[in-house]
Amino acid sequence: MSITTEETGPPAWRLLLGYVRPHRWALLGGALLSLMTGATGLMLPLVARDLIDDLTDDRAITGALLLMSALVVANAVLGALGSYVLRRTAESVVLGARRSLSSYLLRLRITAVDRSEPGDLMARITSDTTLLREVTTDSLVGLGTGGLTLLATVTLMGFVDPVLLGVTLGVIALAGTVLGVIVPHINRASRQAQDAVGLMGASLERVLGALRTVKASGAEPREERALHDAAQESWRQSVRAAKWSAAAGNTAGLAMQIAFITVLAVGGARVATDAIDVGTLVAFLLFVFYLMSPIQQVVGALTQYQTGSAALARIQEALRLPAEPADGPAALPTPGAAPAALAFEDVRFRYADDLPYVHHGVTFTVPAQGMTAFVGPSGAGKTTVFSLIERFYDPGSGVITLDGRDLADWELSRLRASIGYVEQDAPVLSGSLRDNLLLGNPEADDGTLTRVLKTTRLDGLVARLPDGLDTLVGHRGTKLSGGERQRVAIARALLRRPRLLLLDEATSQLDAVNEAALRDTVADVARTTTVLVVAHRLSTVTAADRIVVMDAGRVRAVGTHRELVTADPLYAELAATQFLATAE
Ligand SMILES: Nc1ncnc2c1ncn2[C@@H]1O[C@H](COP(=O)(O)OP(=O)(O)OP(=O)(O)O)[C@@H](O)[C@H]1O
């Protein structure tokens, strides 16, 4: 899938100039070196003419020969230096684009991520930015230096013989018309080829992210086909682009050959009528020969730009996705910071304009400190309450306040620094156990870490593992059990010293002993912190200070377990049938 945005932004070259601007001096240096390379090349025909004249007039040719040798060496050295500087600059442009794009993607709003394929976004950072390299050197510099060299060559040719120049330009103009038709095709094919690479990234991410399920479902052949189709489509479009590029390159080459032959014929006739001498014709033919390189450079720049602008357009689309403000990291609450109070006032919310409302006016208050459990049937909107508190989404109407202050008025990083969030599927990132635990607070000291490991009963696991905290947990923590992953997620949240802890309880995955231990931990934390739990266990709800019963996007009752069992039929039914009643 590719991102679809309605807006049309500024043209691709504007974005390219933005990336190039910090490196403009290096680029200019590289371009100057290229120009000097071109100039040394251009001087050769003139020296050659002198050499022929010297020969014809029986003069010594040593000087002309020495000059020619010096020019050839200078041409090679300047050429090598120029191409190094340009390539280095182009790599820096790619680096800049990758940095800014990856920073941007990390700040994407969750709504934007909901609508995109991570694999496709990944392809935009890795594959599309790579194409900027060629656009910078071949396209920008090629157009600049090639254009200037072309102009200089044409001017010199005009001085040598305006008639022959007219003949040459006539042939080039014809070729230019043909190129005008070819070039847009390259852009379209390149765009489709890059989209197909994005599609492949998305398919790959889909498969690798759920490889166990794919294997267990025997779905490998189908997924393989999807991957192959995307690869095939990229091939097909790249080949189409190659076909048009080849046609463009050859049109330019052919035009030069025709120009060469025409100049030879017309020039020969002019020599025969004594309008010009042989030296002038040779010099002109050498100029036509030298014209080849800048023309090919300009044509290459135009075709390359088509590929690059397709990539730039894809990068631009990613940069138009809605992102959160970049307000920098905020300090975590100091130890012993006061717990937070929370309130929802008539909150209405839906995930997208074309989706039905999930919250139809949710209202509740949670005082600072203590444990509040959210219960309700599946799909009632409990997890959505947590997503709104974290401001992954903003409510359509109504107000959510933390410490009496509207969430919209909080600096986002400060808001999130106050909260510890344990998601239901308790994600663990690849890396070591220590990296995972310290993800939310890299500065936590060893004493705190040991204490948290103990409260979450992870100390036994760490002692058992051969590399202890430095054990690598595998992609998405596959080397840990479900229960361990969950405890790691809780430990990670606790290490942030949250003033508000959001715990989306897993529906399973904890054995009775660990569940009892965790209940004690959460009860302990609730003495100094405000704890909100989406509860699936009877042991959790009975331990809660208050329970919010949600149904179909509304709060239908608030109370304690004892009160609700008699007062609310839905709660009574949930308590009797749905809670996983273990470890009381
Ligand atoms: N990112 C999303 N985009 C669109 N719809 C969503 C999204 N997340 C959840 N929903 C929908 O919102 C509704 C409420 O979901 P929510 O996860 O809040 O329910 P829940 O009460 O936590 O359920 P459960 O107990 O099964 O976890 C569901 O109908 C769900 O399909």
Image: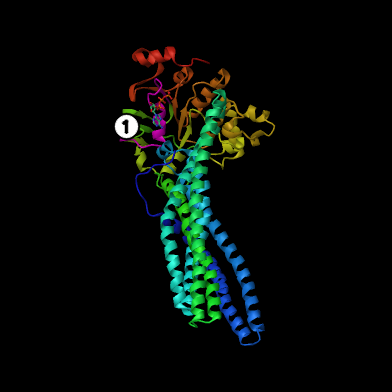
For image coordinates 59% across by 79% down, the residue present is 47
Q: Could you tell me if residue 334 is visible in this image? A: no
Q: Measured along the vertical axis of the image, is residue 487 above or below residue 377?
A: below
Q: Is residue 416 left or right of residue 42?
A: left
Dot 1 amino acid type: Val
Q: Measured along the vertical axis of the image, is residue 371 above or below residue 287?
A: above
Seen from the viewer's position, the closer of residues 128 and 263 is: 263
Q: Is residue 105 left or right of residue 463?
A: left
Q: Which residue is disc 1 drawn over?
A: 347
Q: Measured along the vertical axis of the image, is residue 537 above or below residue 283?
A: above
Q: Could you tell me if residue 164 is visible in this image? A: yes
Count of numbered tags: 1
**Would you say residue 377 sits in the magenta stretch?**
yes
Which residue is situated farthest in the right direction here? 466
Seen from the viewer's position, the closer of residues 499 and 240 is: 240
Q: Secondary structure at mark 1?
A: strand
For image coordinates 47% across by 19% down, the residue present is 537
Q: Is the residue marked by circle 1 packed among few (<14), some (14-19), or many (20+) residues within 10 Å?
A: many
| Residue 536 at x, y percent in the picture | 46, 20
Q: Quadrant of residue 393?
A: top left
| Residue 398 at x, y percent in the picture | 30, 34
**Would you say residue 505 sits in the magenta stretch?**
no
Looking at the rendering, the stretch of residues picked out in magenta corresponds to 372-397
| Residue 163 at x, y percent in the picture | 44, 76
| Residue 301 at x, y percent in the picture | 48, 59
For image coordinates 46% across by 47% down, the residue present is 189
Seen from the viewer's position, the closer of residues 72 and 205 is: 72
In which quadrant of the rendered image does the N terminus lie? top left
| Figure quadrant, ligand 1 | top left
